[in-house]
Image (cartoon, rainbow, N blue to C red):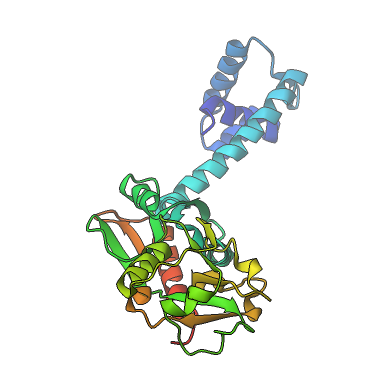
């Protein structure tokens, strides 16, 4: 908010007289005159040239008027924004996710939501599962998306939907026509999968151990989509969730085949918030919007 003296100064500049400014502000002319005199005294400059028919800005007065007008507009903008935030709360939606959601799903969700709610702002933090949990527990993020095989009692599960791991390969791969595959089927092909910190690798290791197999992958990365461009025209099999394949440039040339091994179906997409935390209005709206998109997202045939 600009000061009373500056407000009266701008009104005199606009009206061209103290009497006109007093009428516009619904105050006595003496009150306007006192504030202008005090402002000139504080600045040590003459702001108006007193004329027979009113008051005209001096050169210094014109400079101050330009500044005061800009300050008044900025004060109005900030005040409007504060009032809006008082209604919708914080307009910045803070998200954390594991990298599988950052390829396409979350960016497209954010863009579509912002078209509906232009005031929304986003801050996305992409990390490994344990770091995603920490972001929520320490209050650094409001909403987190991750693949999970277990739930954390400290976090509130807002949505839990199945997200099995598939064997992903070129449409012309020898295994592509199968209705399902098992771990033993992968033994003869180069394998691509995530490193030790990913849920895919954890489930793969458990499935191999239960089947009495040792399969050494040919390609390992902490980035689940890193090797997908290698699949068309090759014998490589990648282990990935179906959501990761959505929107890939070569997606129409790839096939996701489900596993018979029960371990590869023991994974879910989990959307979590902090227990006991009340989300701002926009964050709650985005949570509902995102949950709806995850619920109706296409899934590979079982």
The residue that appears at 56% across and 15% down in the rendered structure is 38
Q: Position of residue 54 (x, y in %)?
A: 72, 26
- Residue nearest the viewer, comparing 104 with 281: 104
- Residue nearest the viewer, comparing 196 with 137: 196
The residue that appears at 40% across and 67% down in the rendered structure is 214
**In the picture provided, is 89 more to the left or to the right than 78?**
left
The residue that appears at 46% across and 51% down in the rendered structure is 127
Q: Is residue 108 above or below residue 155?
A: below
The answer to whether any part of residue 299 appears in the image is no
Q: Is residue 127 above or below residue 260?
A: above
Total marks placed: 0
Q: Position of residue 13 (x, y in %)?
A: 69, 30
- Residue nearest the viewer, comparing 38 with 76: 76
The answer to whether any part of residue 60 appears in the image is yes
The image quadrant of residue 22 is top right
The image quadrant of residue 50 is top right
Quarter placement of the C terminus: bottom left
């Amino acid at each position: 908010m600009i000061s009373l003296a500056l407000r009266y100064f701008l009104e005199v500049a606009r009206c061209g007289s103290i009497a006109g400014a007093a009428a516009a502000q619904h105050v006595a002319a003496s009150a306007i005159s006192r504030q202008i005199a005090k402002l000139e005294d504080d600045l040590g400059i003459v702001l108006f040239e007193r004329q027979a028919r009113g008051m005209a800005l001096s050169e210094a007065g014109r400079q101050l008027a330009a500044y005061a007008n800009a300050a008044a507009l900025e004060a109005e903008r900030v005040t409007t924004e504060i009032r809006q935030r008082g209604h919708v709360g914080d307009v910045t939606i803070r998200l954390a996710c594991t990298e599988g959601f950052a390829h396409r799903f979350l960016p497209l969700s954010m863009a579509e939501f912002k078209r509906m709610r232009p005031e929304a702002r986003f801050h996305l933090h992409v990390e490994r599962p344990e770091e995603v949990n920490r972001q929520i527990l320490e209050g650094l993020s409001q909403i987190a998306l991750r693949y999970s095989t277990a739930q954390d009692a400290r976090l509130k599960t807002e949505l839990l939907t199945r997200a099995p791991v598939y064997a992903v390969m070129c449409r012309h791969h020898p295994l592509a026509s199968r209705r399902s595959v098992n771990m033993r089927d992968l033994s003869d092909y180069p394998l691509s999968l995530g490193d030790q910190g990913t849920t895919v690798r954890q489930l793969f290791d458990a499935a191999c151990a239960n089947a009495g197999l040792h399969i050494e992958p040919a390609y390992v990365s902490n980035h689940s989509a890193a090797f997908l461009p290698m699949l068309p025209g090759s014998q490589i099999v990648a282990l990935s969730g179906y959501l990761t394949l959505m929107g890939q440039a070569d997606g129409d040339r790839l096939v996701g085949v489900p596993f018979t091994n029960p371990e590869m179906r023991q994974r879910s997409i989990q959307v979590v918030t902090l227990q006991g935390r009340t989300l701002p209005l926009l964050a709650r709206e985005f949570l509902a919007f995102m949950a709806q998109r995850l619920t109706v997202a296409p899934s590979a045939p079982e």
